[in-house]
Image (spheres, rainbow, N blue to C red):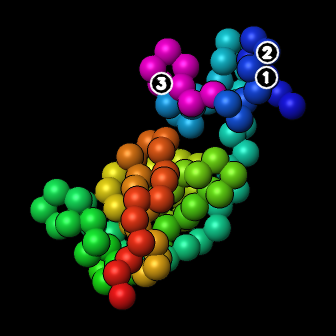
Amino acid sequence: MPSINGIDFNNINSINGVSWNSVTDISGVDISHGASCTSLSFGYSDGRRIKPSNSCLATPFFYDFDSTNNLLYVSGKCGVTFATAGYYSDGVTIYSWDGSSSWSVFDACGI
């Protein structure tokens, strides 16, 4: 597995405070992040003006999701443009996304 100073690429989140996905080369060596995305549909809530649970019933839009690295991108922008931070739901589960590196289960949608 490729590594930097003995650390597996998959375990690197940032370099000098720069998100790993924004790094395109290191010392002149091109870096490929290997993003491979699936198109998924999610409802969205910002969690501030609109509570997270509203994402369960919000109109769904398509996004690109990199399940290897748990990263959410704007549709058609896999590996390039992150989706806006907030709460996303597939109608069953609510996920929290920080807008750059952290995707996690937040809660279940109510019935």
Q: Identify the residue at horizontal 27%, vertical 65% (top origin).
A: 52
Residue position marked by numbered label 2 in the rendering: 6
Please state, as top left, top right, bottom left or bottom right, where the C terminus lies in the image: bottom left
In the rendered image, residue 83, in percent from the top left (x then y), is placed at 41, 56
Whichever of labels 2 and 3 marks the residue nearer the N terminus, that label is 2
Q: Identify the residue at horizontal 79%, vertical 22% (top origin).
A: 3
In the rendered image, residue 104, in percent from the top left (x then y), is placed at 48, 53
Whichever of labels 1 and 3 marks the residue nearer the N terminus, that label is 1
Distance from the alpha carbon under mark 1 to that under mark 2: 5 Å
Q: Secondary structure at mark 1?
A: strand
Residue 34's quadrant in the figure?
top right
Amino acid of disc 3: Val
Amino acid of disc 2: Gly
Residue at the left extreme of this rendering: 49
In the displayed structure image, the side of residue 65 where residue 49 appears, left or right: left
Residue at the bottom extreme of this rendering: 111
Q: Identify the residue at horizontal 57%, vertical 61% (top origin).
A: 65
Residue position marked by numbered label 1 in the rendering: 3
Q: How many marks?
A: 3
Classify 83 as above or below 1: below
Q: In the rendered structure, are the residues bearing label 1 and label 2 in contact, judged by CB atoms less than 8 Å apart? A: yes
Residue position marked by numbered label 3 in the rendering: 18
Q: Residues within 10 Å of mark 2 (few under 14, many from 20)?
A: few
Distance from the alpha carbon under mark 1 to that under mark 3: 17 Å
- Queried whether the magenta region covers residue 16, the answer comes back as yes
Q: Identify the residue at horizontal 55%, vertical 19% (top origin).
A: 15
Magenta stretch, residue numbers? 12-18
* Residue 87 disc label: none
In the displayed structure image, the side of residue 35 where residue 16 appears, left or right: left
